[in-house]
Image (tube, rainbow, N blue to C red):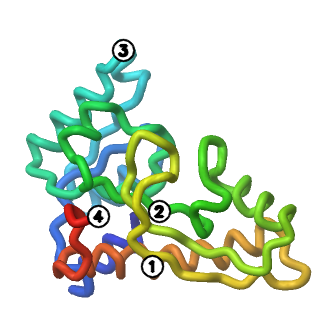
């Protein structure tokens, strides 16, 4: 999220962040958003425990803030059906591997990089894609490759992929904002 906020602030990303929602009440993202003057909400199954409550609350909050494109940056839960309907083809996510390889349920954080190394991959990378009903299966918008180096550990690989993610995500969002990538055409 910070890389996206910096791209907006520098003028490299012509967008207006309207709302940050985080399912972790202690996440720095909420503080960073507030410091940038962006409304920030903690919403989780703790705050909205009933079936479908979280999905309804998040979708309603986004609509109230006139959100046009949902950008997931570290959100670790499957998006609910109301949000998927309301923001069909307008929910963007990033994954720290070259999808469709090393994606799906449970493939997040260090687990992805452990799997890449265990598979003997010579390259990995980052993928920006549209989110849908399945983990990491939506249409791919952009991918950048990162070599797997001899002697890489999951941690060293994760650090290099994260650097790539911090460049790829704002660049892909810039291309969406400029109309170079048309989400509804996918």
Element assignment for label 2: strand
Element assignment for label 1: helix
x then y, percent, for residue 98: 60, 69
- Lower sequence index among marks 4 and 3: 3
Nearer the observer: mark 4 or 2; the answer is 4
x then y, percent, for residue 92: 35, 59
Residue farthest along the right direction in this orientation: 151
Q: Residues within 10 Å of mark 3 (few under 14, many from 20)?
A: few
Relative to 140, residue 144 above or below: below
- Lower sequence index among marks 4 and 2: 2
Task: Write down the residue under mark 4.
Answer: 186
- Lower sequence index among marks 1 and 2: 2
Q: Residues within 10 Å of mark 4 (few under 14, many from 20)?
A: few
Circles 4, 2 touching at the beta carbon (< 8 Å): no
Quote the CA–CA distance across marks 2 and 3.
27 Å
**Residue shown at 84% from the left, 77% from the top:** 152
Element assignment for label 4: loop
**Residue shown at 21% from the left, 71% from the top:** 182
Query: In the rendering, which numbered label is found on residue 168?
Result: 1
Q: Residues within 10 Å of mark 2 (few under 14, many from 20)?
A: many
Report the front residue among 114 and 12. Answer: 114
Quote the CA–CA distance across marks 1 and 3.
35 Å
Nearer the observer: mark 4 or 3; the answer is 4
Task: Write down the residue under mark 3.
Answer: 51
In which quarter of the view is residue 149 placed?
bottom right
Query: In the rendering, which numbered label is found on residue 94?
Result: 2
Quote the CA–CA distance across marks 4 and 3.
31 Å
Number of disc labels = 4
């Amino acid at each position: 999220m910070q890389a996206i906020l910096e791209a907006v602030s520098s003028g490299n990303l012509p967008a207006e962040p309207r709302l940050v929602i985080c399912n972790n009440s202690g996440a720095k993202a909420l503080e960073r958003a507030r410091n940038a003057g962006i409304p920030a909400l903690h919403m989780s199954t703790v705050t909205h425990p009933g079936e479908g409550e979280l999905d309804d609350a998040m979708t309603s909050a986004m609509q109230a803030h006139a959100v046009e494109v949902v950008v997931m940056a570290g959100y670790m839960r499957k998006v609910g059906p109301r949000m998927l309907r309301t923001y069909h083809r307008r929910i963007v996510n990033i994954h720290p591997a070259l999808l469709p390889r090393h994606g799906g349920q449970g493939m997040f954080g260090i687990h992805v990089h452990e799997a890449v190394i265990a598979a003997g991959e010579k390259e990995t990378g980052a993928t920006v894609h549209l989110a849908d009903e399945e983990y990491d299966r939506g249409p791919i918008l952009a991918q950048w490759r990162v070599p797997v180096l001899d002697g890489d550990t999951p941690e060293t690989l994760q650090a290099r992929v994260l650097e790539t993610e911090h460049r790829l995500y704002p660049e892909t969002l810039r291309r969406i904002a400029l109309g170079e990538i048309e989400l509804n055409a996918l």
